[in-house]
Amino acid sequence: MHEFDWSSIPNALPFLWDGMKISLEITLSAVVFGIVWGTLLALMRLSSITPLSWFAAGYVNLFRAVPLVMVLLWFFLIVPHLLESLFGLPRGTDMRLTSAIAGFALFEAAYYSEIIRAGIQSVPKGQMAAASALGMTYGQAMRLVVLPQAFRNMVPLLLTQGIILFQDTSLVYVSALADFFGAAYKVGDRDGRLVELLLFAGAVYFVLCFAASRVVRHYQNRMKTA
Amino acid sequence: MISMNKVSKHYGSFQVLADCTTEVHKGEVIVVCGPSGSGKSTLIKCVNGLEPFQSGEIIVNGVSVGDPKTNLSKLRSTVGMVFQNFELFPHMRIIDNLAIAQVKVLGRNPEQAREKGLKLLDRVGLRVQAEKYPGQLSGGQQQRVAIARALSMDPICMLFDEPTSALDPEMINEVLDVMTELAQEGMTMMCVTHEMGFARRVANRVIFMDQGRIVEDDSKEAFFGNPRSERAQQFLAKILHH
Ligand SMILES: Nc1ncnc2c1ncn2[C@@H]1O[C@H](COP(=O)(O)OP(=O)(O)O)[C@@H](O)[C@H]1O
Ligand SMILES: [Mg+2]
């Protein structure tokens, strides 16, 4: 039977914490950009301007039909080259974090836009009519009346999607970027304690995600009674 | 103030409005009634361009609603509208419901807008509710807030689409009282309603619609006295019965 030896974890904590910071940075940036871009996509999808709604529909369907890990690989391979040639950056600048954030954000935006589109449609039509009747432009009515209500209804779904995204950040291991999972893997590999490190990492992911989803649930219940 | 000339609208082959022609003068109160589905809501939503129409012409205060060059938002800011389901903004306090369009559309400063909002709440007897959210108010109170919200824009006329249909019976009068007061102050009003008592009290004219057509457009005395069309007679008999 395997003898567990956890001794390499305490010394590795600072390194693991650096990894966690990268995971959180990717998650937060991708959630923020994903929601902003997702909102724009949802508005395009719902707009009466046909080319816009086709573009948004095409975008969403494309990104929902390819595996995330592949999108990430494309970005690791393409974005650095693109930036190098666009801005004349020196070859070999480490662009993996930027690429990862861009890849996640663009991918997640496709999912967010569907959540947001449903959220917008869940706001009664009369709200837009009432806002328009007061003289608000379409943009004002969306921004001041419809979207705030849509987002309030969507918060649990958006957070849940954020939790999934946090777990998915571990996929950046394909670029050898030391996120939390990557850092745990490196330490385990170096010390020959892979099993222990991966169990530890799994436990951390579980505790964080489970706690976060409890918070979401609590919020949901509070909203129901309000 | 409002003039409609041969306004028609259809969804595909279904004719919602057919050659509707009428006129509302300054200070007049017009009651629009008719069976459900006859096009009453569509008709008054055409007045402020919430519903587009395919042919005919509507002129509001000298501005053509159907003209693509018309700034509809600007036109709507001068026409108050009250909906069957109140449509207060549930995520804003009552006072913010009254202030937001004043600030964002008319460019009034927030203090002024608040001041004006409170005055109007006072007028509909709801000043103490200013800091609450719409969900905390009864239906009748919400509808009075909705009327105050429309008035906060200093409209030149008011449109009402069945303002009391979604209310419990005991709350109908508090809303009708506010409307009656408005009418007596000389507000130009176009009201879709089945409240015939209200019509008798304050209306100048009654329009009766059926299947997208304006079937009767008469003084209230003539309408209640002896409506010409059989449909209007049947409708009145039914509605006055209960
Ligand atoms: N978007 C729509 N598509 C097709 N038919 C519609 C639409 N909106 C309303 N209608 C129809 O137009 C008719 C008139 O509706 P409405 O103006 O709401 O009547 P009322 O207010 O008199 O009850 C109804 O028969 C309704 O079914
Ligand atoms: Mg109606």
Image: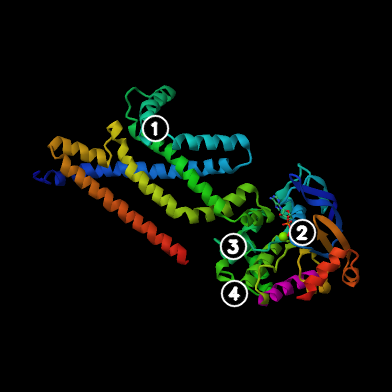
Say above or below: B103 vs A72. below
Residue at the extreme bottom: B170
- Say if disc 4 is inside 8 Å of ligand 2: no
* Callout 2 secondary element: helix
| Front label number (3 vs 1) | 1
**Discs 3, 1 touching: Cβ within 8 Å:** no
Residue to which mark 4 is pinned: B128
**Which numbered disc, 4 or 3, marks the residue that appears first in the sequence?**
3
The residues tagged by marks 4 and 2 sit, at their Cα atoms, a distance apart of 35 Å
Letter of the chain that mark 2 sits on in the rendering: B
Mark 4–mark 3 CB contact (< 8 Å)? no
Residue B231 in the image: above or below residue A6: below
The answer to whether marks 3 and 1 sit on the same chain is no
**Residues beneath discs 4 and 2 located on the same chain:** yes
Which residue position is annotated with label 2? B40
Choose mark 4 or mark 2, whichever is in front.
2
**Amino acid type, label 1:** Val
